[in-house]
Image (spheres, rainbow, N blue to C red):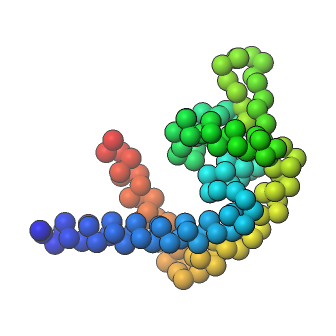
Amino acid sequence: MGKDTERALKLFIVLSRASKVVLEEANKLTDTYNLNPTEFAVLELLYHKGRQPIQKIGQKILLRSGSMTYVVDKLEKKGLLERVFCQEDKRITYMSITDEGKKRIEEIFPSHEENIKSIMSALTEEEQETAIELLRKLGLSVKSLS
């Protein structure tokens, strides 16, 4: 195995492990509010971006449509979001956050922000900017391969 391959594999392993532990730590907070990470991501998206077609939500949080329907159903049963049928095009269903959903996000989000800030504080501001730049570059290059 060449040095290039060895370095690439090492980077992959380090990136994967770092991602796993960061996500686990970030998700501990949402667990205390009886929301899984996907449910939180959907609520957070709708809170900050307003109502969205169900297909767009899945694309934005990288979830398959079958899974998206399951998550949306669970959040609807909890009273945190609602379906809004498009009058102009009956094929489109929007998801909209309810007042109860807004209340839940407003309760969680300040702690979530602080938690993320704390998790990332292992890196200096400059290191965080460099990491953002490098990971964006990596993500875009991989996306262009497919």
Which quadrant does the N terminus fall into? bottom left
Residue at 73%, 44% in the rendered image: 75
Residue 95 image offset from top left, x and y in percent: 73, 36
- Observer able to see residue 59: no
Residue 133 higher or lower than 95, as above or below:
below
In the displayed structure, does residue 139 sit left or right of residue 31? left
So how many labels did they put on this image? 0
Residue 144 higher or lower than 36, as above or below:
above
Residue 38 image offset from top left, x and y in percent: 61, 52
Residue at 78%, 29% in the rendered image: 84
In the displayed structure, does residue 107 sit left or right of residue 45? right
Residue at 45%, 72% in the rendered image: 18
Residue 115 image offset from top left, x and y in percent: 67, 74
Residue at 62%, 39% in the rendered image: 70
Please tell me in which quadrant of the rendered image residue 50 appears. top right
126 or 135, which is in the foreground? 135
Residue 5 image offset from top left, x and y in percent: 19, 66
Residue 16 higher or lower than 71, as above or below:
below
